C-alpha cells in the first residue's frame, strides 16, 4: 500500500470519530511521522465554539504524544463542495513540525483531490528557525 493510501485510510477512519454537533462537518487528518508511524486526528467541537479543535491539531497532538518529532507527509479529508484545505491556524501548526517541501494532501471521501507543499500553503512563514 502506498503512503498516500495509508494516510487516506487512517484519516478517513479518524474522520468518522469527529465530534461535530455544531457544524456537522467531519474532518480527519493523518500524519506520517519521522518515526515511521501514522498518527491520526479528528475535529472535536465545543459548545463554546472557539474552544473546538481541528483534525490537524488532533493528529499533531497524537504524533507528539507518540514520540514523533517531524511531519514527513500529511493528509486532510473532508466532504464538501470544495477541497478541505487546512485552515490558517493549522497551516501554522503544521509548519512547526514540517519542512517547506513536506507534502500535504487534501482528500474527499473517494480519494485525494489536490496535493500541496507546506510552502505553497504557507509561504514566507515564521517557524522555529526564526527563534534560533
Ligand atoms: N476543520 C478542521 O478540522 N480542519 C480544517 O482544516 C478546516 C476546518 C473543522 C473545524 C470545525 O470543527 C469544522 O471543520 C467546520 O469549520
Image: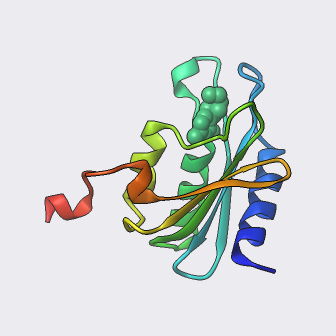
Q: Which residue is drawn at 77% across and 52% down?
A: 14
Between 78 and 36, which is closer to the camera in this rendering? 78
x and y, in percent, of residue 33 in the image: 55, 73
Q: Residue at x 83, y 47 (%)?
A: 109
Residue 32 location, quadrant: bottom right
Q: Is residue 98 above or below residue 26?
A: below
Q: Residue at x 59, y 62 (%)?
A: 74
Between 122 and 21, which is closer to the camera in this rendering? 122
x and y, in percent, of residue 84 in the image: 65, 40
Render colour scheme: rainbow
- Does residue 45 appear in this view? no
> Which quadrant is the C terminus positioned in?
bottom left
Q: Which residue is drawn at 64% across and 77% down?
A: 37
Q: How many marks?
A: 0
Residue 53 location, quadrant: top right
Q: In this view, does 11 lie above or below 99?
A: above
> Which quadrant is the N terminus positioned in?
bottom right
Q: In which quarter of the image is ligand 1?
A: top right
- Does residue 41 appear in this view? yes
User: As drawn, is 94 to the left or to the right of 62?
Assistant: left
x and y, in percent, of residue 79 in the image: 78, 37
Between 8 and 48, which is closer to the camera in this rendering? 8
Q: Is residue 33 above or below residue 53?
A: below
User: As drawn, is 56 to the left or to the right of 132?
Assistant: right
User: As drawn, is 12 to the left or to the right of 61?
Assistant: right
Residue furthest to the left:
132
x and y, in percent, of residue 87 in the image: 51, 37
Amino acid at each position: 500500500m502506498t503512503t498516500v493510501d495509508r494516510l487516506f485510510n487512517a484519516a478517513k477512519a479518524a474522520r468518522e470519530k469527529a465530534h461535530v454537533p455544531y457544524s456537522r462537518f467531519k474532518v480527519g487528518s493523518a500524519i506520517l511521522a519521522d518515526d515511521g508511524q501514522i498518527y491520526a486526528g479528528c475535529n472535536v467541537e465545543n459548545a463554546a465554539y472557539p474552544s473546538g479543535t481541528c483534525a490537524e491539531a488532533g493528529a499533531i497532538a497524537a504524533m507528539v504524544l507518540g514520540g514523533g518529532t517531524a511531519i514527513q507527509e500529511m493528509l486532510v479529508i473532508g466532504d464538501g463542495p470544495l477541497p478541505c484545505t487546512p485552515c490558517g491556524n493549522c497551516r501554522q501548526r503544521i509548519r512547526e513540525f514540517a519542512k517547506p517541501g513536506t507534502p500535504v494532501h487534501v482528500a474527499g471521501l473517494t480519494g485525494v483531490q489536490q496535493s500541496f507543499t507546506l510552502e505553497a500553503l504557507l509561504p514566507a512563514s515564521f517557524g522555529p528557525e526564526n527563534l534560533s
